[in-house]
Image (cartoon, helix red, strand yellow):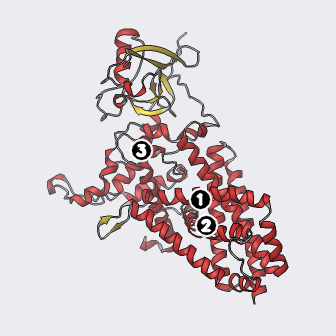
């Protein structure tokens, strides 16, 4: 029996929950997005450090000992790896997201990436100086 | 080089109640042949029931987009010899409903494209009689890359956001909106912003970047979308801060 | 007239948080998660660290940074849940993610308040 229909009987292919494991670029993308959880963890970690500082020298020393314990170091190594992934991908994507022109000429992507790493270096040097002087 | 290569082609018949299945065809492996040539060989010599779209066979019409070994590609620009010894899996363009065999239903994209008003919008009454619009080479360069889009929809096939949420306006539509916003002859940025500032507009994009990677014309839709987000954010800040008259 | 939307502003905070995470967080992590606890660099004595960290300027800057970092994380994780796990409860997911950011921002606020008190 033919049924008149206004649109074809189309077939919708389902998208697997594991779509992001099928291609390397998709996998790196999801890892990059998951770095956000570790950014939040580091905020918590730094807040714990600041609370220890507030509570006095003994609490501060306890915090440093706790931070040196294997489990915490292990967690922080994994978290730091994700943070590095964030830094590298964020810096490399910025030129694509912004078309910056200086005096009418487009700035080459390599310069934008380089400027960001330079900024990272300057900020890092400043913070190290501020904290260790 | 071997004589032939195997194509595993997805077949689907809407009048039959069966899910799609892969059918294997042997096609000659000629050094200058593309996947499209292989499909035409199948249709002409082996199985006339195979349905697929194609036209210019030179990468400018955007008709022959399909998923080749999982990658959205223009089959007229995808060489058989690059996949030797094969087999090569040829499936309809991902993220679109399949009408039959390798033909997908494009109506969603056709509905989205006019929504972003991809034409010159003027706020004056200048007509052709008054003379042509003048544009410097620098003004052309500002939008030229985004004007290269051939509406092949490979970017939609690559975009996981579109695959998971078909309400998303999508890469090509946003890149084309940006193409007109950046055109010095156009005054329609506000109208397009009202469409794209919605949740299914630019904000669904998470900058996966796969659209840019698969684009055969190097349009860089991902870049266009991020630039559009910055522009939309700037307009939103102005909308919140400035009184109505100054916007 | 452009209708007022909150998404662009959240996205701006997400972007700002991404920049802060890339530029400021690495050195803080290097020092406080590795160099000081593991003794690679001599840790500053408590008095000096309190003087630097508790300084009102530092407090304001750090609090601002922590808030955008939390918004960045919440925003990104929310979309990861949509796209990665294909969670359909969109409003609930958004509420939980931004709610957590709000909660942790409140925790940060009180942490900094007590820190300022200890400094002063």
Above-or-below relation of B34 to B135 = above
Q: Position of residue B22 (x, y in %)?
A: 52, 18
Q: Position of residue A75 (x, y in %)?
A: 73, 57
Cβ atoms under marks 3 and 2 closer than 8 Å = no
Above-or-below relation of B133 to B9 = below
Q: Is residue B29 left or right of residue C97?
A: left
Above-or-below relation of C38 to B226 = below
Q: Which residue is mark 1?
A: A84
Observer-nearest residue: C80 or A117?
A117
Observer-nearest residue: C1 or C118?
C118
Q: Is residue C14 left or right of residue B52?
A: right
Tag of residue C26: 2
Spatial separation of the CA atoms under disc 1 and disc 3: 31 Å
Tag of residue B172: 3
- Residue that sits furthest to the bottom in the current view: C120
Observer-nearest residue: C84 or B5?
B5
| Quarter of the image where one finds residue C114 | bottom right
| Quarter of the image where one finds residue C120 | bottom right
């Amino acid at each position: 029996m033919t049924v008149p229909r206004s649109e074809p009987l189309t077939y919708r292919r389902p998208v697997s929950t594991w779509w992001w494991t099928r291609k390397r670029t998709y996998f790196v993308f999801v890892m990059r997005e998951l770095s956000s959880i570790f950014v939040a963890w580091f905020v918590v970690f730094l807040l714990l450090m600041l609370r220890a500082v507030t509570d006095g020298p003994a609490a501060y020393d306890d915090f440093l000992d706790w931070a040196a314990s294997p489990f915490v170091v292990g967690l922080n190594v994994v978290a730091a790896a994700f943070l590095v992934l964030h830094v590298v991908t964020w810096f490399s994507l910025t030129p694509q997201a912004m078309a910056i022109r200086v005096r009418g000429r487009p700035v080459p992507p390599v310069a934008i990436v380089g400027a960001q790493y330079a900024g990272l270096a300057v900020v890092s040097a400043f913070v190290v100086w501020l904290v260790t002087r | 080089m071997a004589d032939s290569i195997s194509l595993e082609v997805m077949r689907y018949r809407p009048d039959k109640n069966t899910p799609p299945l892969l059918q294997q065809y042997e096609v000659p492996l000629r050094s200058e042949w593309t996947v499209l040539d292989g499909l035409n060989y199948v249709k002409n010599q082996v199985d006339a029931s195979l349905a697929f779209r194609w036209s210019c066979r030179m990468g400018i019409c955007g008709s022959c987009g399909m998923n080749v070994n999982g990658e959205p590609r223009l089959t007229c620009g995808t060489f058989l010899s690059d996949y030797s010894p094969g087999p090569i899996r040829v499936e309809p363009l991902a993220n679109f409903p399949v009408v039959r065999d390798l033909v997908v239903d494009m109506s969603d994209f056709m509905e989205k494209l006019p929504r972003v008003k991809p034409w010159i919008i003027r706020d004056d009454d200048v007509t052709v009689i008054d003379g042509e619009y003048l544009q410097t080479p620098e003004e052309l360069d500002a939008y030229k890359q985004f004007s290269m889009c051939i509406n092949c929809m490979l970017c939609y096939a690559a975009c996981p956001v579109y695959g998971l949420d078909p309400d998303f306006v999508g890469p090509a539509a946003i890149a084309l909106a940006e193409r007109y916003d950046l055109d010095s002859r156009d005054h329609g940025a506000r109208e397009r912003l009202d469409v794209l500032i919605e949740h299914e507009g630019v904000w669904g994009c998470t900058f996966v970047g796969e659209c840019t990677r698969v684009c055969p014309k190097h349009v860089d839709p991902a870049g266009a979308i991020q630039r559009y987000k910055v522009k939309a954010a700037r307009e939103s800040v102005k909308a919140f801060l400035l009184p109505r008259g100054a916007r | 007239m452009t209708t007022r939307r909150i998404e662009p502003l959240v996205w701006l905070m997400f972007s700002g948080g991404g920049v802060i995470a890339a530029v400021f967080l690495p050195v803080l992590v290097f020092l406080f998660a590795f160099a000081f606890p593991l003794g690679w660099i001599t840790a500053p004595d408590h008095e000096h660290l309190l003087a630097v960290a508790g300084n009102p300027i530092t407090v304001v800057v750090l609090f601002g940074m922590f808030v955008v970092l939390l918004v960045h994380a919440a925003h990104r994780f929310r979309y990861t849940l949509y796209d990665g796990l294909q969670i359909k409860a969109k409003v609930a997911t958004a509420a939980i993610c931004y709610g957590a950011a709000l909660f942790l921002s409140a925790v940060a606020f009180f942490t900094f308040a007590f820190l300022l008190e200890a400094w002063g």
